[in-house]
Image (cartoon, helix red, strand yellow):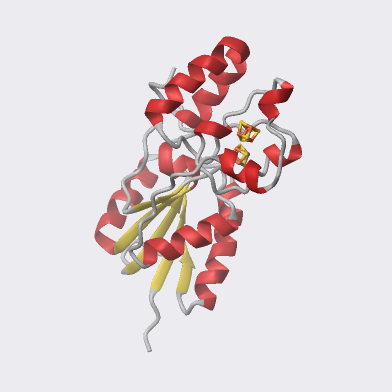
Amino acid sequence: MKKSKAALILLTGCGGCAILLSELAEKLEQGGWEVKVMPPLYVRLDLAIVAGYAKTRVQKTLLSKLKDTADKTIAFGACASRGAYNLQDKAPMEAEAYIDGCPPTINYAENLLEKILNNKNQTENQSVCLECAANQNLCLLKDGLTCLGPITKAGCNGLCTKNHKGCLGCMGVLNRSKAGKYLRLMGKKHGPRIRKQKEIYLGEGLL
Ligand code: SF4
Ligand code: SF4
């Protein structure tokens, strides 16, 4: 039987997503997919997973060609999903689905990919605080730390908070209207740090 074809497309980024994508590729191959890294532009694809953002003209051309050659495109990681480190254009790339995070954890990515491939609802409505509760972490706000957990999408299993580090928001904003209020509150106490985090992860219009 002919295998479904998937491509991993690596654009400008820090390389964190590439490591995760190599793990995800293994899972896809175990599930019967043929996976290529940066295949030629004319290859027809069932799935393209794109990490990083398009900085150069060549990368922008590559992204626009994918619209014709790939049946489904997934933006992978915070750069592709919302231009986290793209200082010129903090916008998501056009895609059928998004696997956010800097980088996404492998469990989160696998679960979400499974939902995407089976056309299941992908809406995330829980925050990192829920993961603190599940891990029985004491809330860091009580220690006076900055934490963006209440406004950040769950999925990382509270990686930072369980190591006594405030959440930086790398999984992306859960609810933009509530986030603004929370950031203003936090900003009064932790101004410069919040501004830096907002610049990187949270996008415009929240403070
Ligand atoms: S430490 Fe942060 S993520 Fe955890 S419960 Fe407190 S505010 Fe929420
Ligand atoms: S705790 Fe926050 S900053 Fe840390 S991995 Fe999770 S979402 Fe990212």
Observer-nearest residue: 12 or 135?
135
Residue at the image position 42 percent from the left and 27 percent from the top? 178
Residue at the image position 39 percent from the left and 49 percent from the top? 123
Can the viewer see residue 38 in this picture?
A: no
Task: Report which quarter residue 144 is drawn in.
Answer: top right
Numbered-mark total:
0
Observer-nearest residue: 176 or 193?
176
Q: Is residue 106 left or right of residue 181?
A: right
Image-quarter location of ligand 2: top right
Quarter of the figure with the N terminus: bottom left
The furthest residue to the top: 188
How far from the left and from the top, in percent, is residue 52? 48, 45
How far from the left and from the top, in percent, is residue 166? 66, 30
- Residue 192 versus residue 47 in the image, above or below: above
Q: In this view, does 38 lie to the left or right of 19?
A: left
Observer-nearest residue: 122 or 87?
122
How far from the left and from the top, in percent, is residue 47? 37, 65
Can the viewer see residue 203 in this picture?
A: yes
Task: Report which quarter residue 27 is drawn in.
Answer: bottom right
How far from the left and from the top, in percent, is residue 38? 45, 60
- Residue 44 versus residue 135 in the image, above or below: below
Task: Report which quarter residue 14 is drawn in.
Answer: top right
Residue at the image position 57 percent from the left and 40 percent from the top? 128
Q: Is residue 54 left or right of residue 72?
A: right
Observer-nearest residue: 170 or 134?
134
